[in-house]
Image: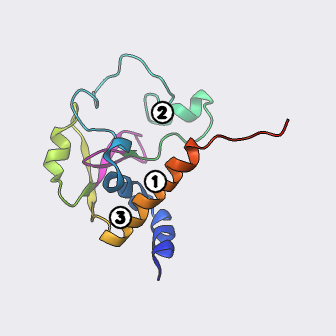
C-alpha cells in the first residue's frame, strides 16, 4: 500500500486524520489550557451543540454540529447522549491525566481512549511538502477573464 492510499485510508477514520495535523504544524490545533477550555463561555460565536442534549437540533440550526475538537494534547468528541465533550484520544506522548488537567471542567474520559501514534518520517515529509505546495498555490494571483 502506497503513502497516498494510507493517507486516504486514515482519512476515513475520524480520529486519525486530525491527529496528523498536530505533527505537520502545531498552529492548526487548539492549545488545551484552562483559559481556552472553560466550563462556561461568556458568549457564543458559532452554534456548536448549544446546551447539549439535543438542543442544537431542536433550535433548527443546520448540520450536526462539531464532530471533534482537536487539541495539542488529544481529541475531544461529543458524547452521544449529552453532547458534552469527552476525551476519546490522546497523542502517544500525552498522559490522560495531563489532558484532563488542561481543561477548566471535570473532563469525562471515554472507556477506551485511543493512543495516536505519530506519523512515520516519510509520511511527515510528504505532508509537509503538500502543505508547502498548497501554501504556494494559494499565494499565486488568479487571473480572471474580463
The residue at the point 60 percent across, 40 percent down is 63
Could you tell me if the residues under marks 3 and 2 are in contact, i.e. CB atoms within 8 Å? no
Q: CA distance from mark 3 to mark 2?
A: 31 Å
Q: Quadrant of the C terminus?
A: top right
* In this view, the mark in front (3 or 1): 1
The residue at the point 14 percent across, 48 percent down is 97
Q: CA distance from mark 2 to mark 1?
A: 31 Å
Could you tell me if the residues under marks 3 and 1 are in contact, i.e. CB atoms within 8 Å? no
On the image, the x and y values in percent for residue 12 come to 50, 65
Q: Residues within 10 Å of mark 3 (few under 14, many from 20)?
A: some
* Foreground pick, 28 / 70: 28
For marks 3 and 1, the one nearer the N-term is: 3
Q: Single out the residue that lies furthest toward the right.
A: 146
Where is mark 1, residue-wise?
132
The residue at the point 46 percent across, 53 percent down is 132
Bounds of the magenta segment: 70-89
Residue 124 is labelled as 3
Q: CA distance from mark 3 to mark 1?
A: 12 Å
Decide whether residue 64 is among the magenta residues.
Answer: no
The residue at the point 20 percent across, 45 percent down is 99
On the image, the x and y values in percent for residue 21 come to 38, 53
Where is mark 2, residue-wise?
48
Q: Secondary structure at mark 1?
A: helix
Q: Secondary structure at mark 2?
A: loop
Amino acid at each position: 500500500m502506497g503513502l497516498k492510499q494510507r493517507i486516504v485510508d486514515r482519512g476515513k477514520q475520524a480520529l486519525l486524520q486530525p491527529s496528523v495535523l498536530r505533527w505537520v504544524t502545531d498552529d492548526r490545533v487548539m492549545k488545551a489550557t484552562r483559559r481556552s477550555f472553560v466550563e462556561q463561555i461568556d458568549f457564543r460565536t458559532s452554534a456548536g451543540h448549544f446546551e447539549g442534549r439535543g438542543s442544537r437540533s431542536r433550535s433548527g440550526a443546520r448540520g450536526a454540529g462539531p464532530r471533534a475538537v482537536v487539541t495539542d494534547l488529544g481529541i475531544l468528541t461529543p458524547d452521544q447522549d449529552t453532547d458534552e465533550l469527552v476525551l476519546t484520544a490522546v497523542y502517544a506522548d500525552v498522559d490522560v491525566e495531563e489532558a484532563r488537567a488542561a481543561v477548566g471542567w471535570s473532563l469525562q474520559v471515554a472507556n477506551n481512549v485511543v493512543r495516536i501514534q505519530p506519523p512515520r518520517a516519510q509520511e511527515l515529509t510528504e505532508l509537509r511538502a503538500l502543505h508547502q505546495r498548497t501554501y504556494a498555490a494559494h499565494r499565486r494571483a488568479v487571473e480572471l477573464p474580463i
